[in-house]
Image (spheres, rainbow, N blue to C red):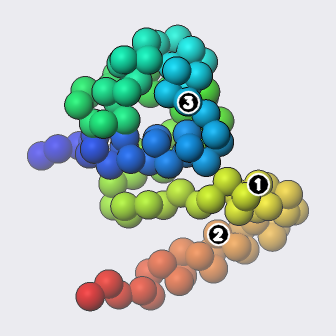
Amino acid sequence: MKLIDYKLLGEKLRKIRTEKNLTQEQVADLSLITAKYYSSVETGNVHVSLSALVHIANALDTPLSPLLDSRHPSPLLPLETRNAIRQLPAGSRILLVYILELLNNSIVVV
């Protein structure tokens, strides 16, 4: 049983990086890893260590859990949306998450 889908993880990292207009070299520098290694992470060609992944997530200012969630191919929202949600009062954020979870559970993909 494969616990982590490294290809999907790489796709998520690439999406976040490009949304933030960062190069692979910039993320690598911020993550304290080589650009070559980071490139291999984005392509899913290496099984990135948890330590390196934490550094990468911190460099991208993104939570770790959505990166590792393979149940949904693209659970990440665009940067503008995430920033707008962060500006909401706590009660509104909780309500929004609840509504999104209800919608997510009611959608059937054929």
Q: Is residue 51 visible?
A: no
Q: For the residue carrying disc 3, how many other residues have a C-alpha within 10 Å: few (<14), some (14-19), or many (20+)?
A: few
- Is 83 positioned to the left or the right of 52 in the image? right
Which numbered marker is on residue 99?
Answer: none
Q: Is residue 20 visible?
A: yes
- Is 99 positioned to the left or the right of 80 in the image? left
Instruction: Indicate the amino acid at tag 3.
Output: Thr
Q: CA distance from mark 1 to mark 3?
A: 21 Å
Which residue position holds label 2?
A: 97
The residue sitting at 62% across, 59% down in the picture is 78
Residue 8 lies, in percent from the top left, at 32, 49
- Check disc 1 and report its element: helix, strand or loop: helix
Which residue position holds label 3?
A: 23
The residue sitting at 37% across, 40% down in the picture is 10
Q: CA distance from mark 2 to mark 1?
A: 14 Å
| Mark 2 vs mark 3: in front | 3
Q: Quadrant of the C terminus?
A: bottom left
Residue 103 lies, in percent from the top left, at 53, 83
Please say if 94 is above or below 1.
Answer: below
The residue sitting at 82% across, 67% down in the picture is 91
Which residue position holds label 1?
A: 83
Mark closer to the chain start, 1 or 3: 3
Residue 2 lies, in percent from the top left, at 17, 44
The residue sitting at 50% across, 27% down in the picture is 24
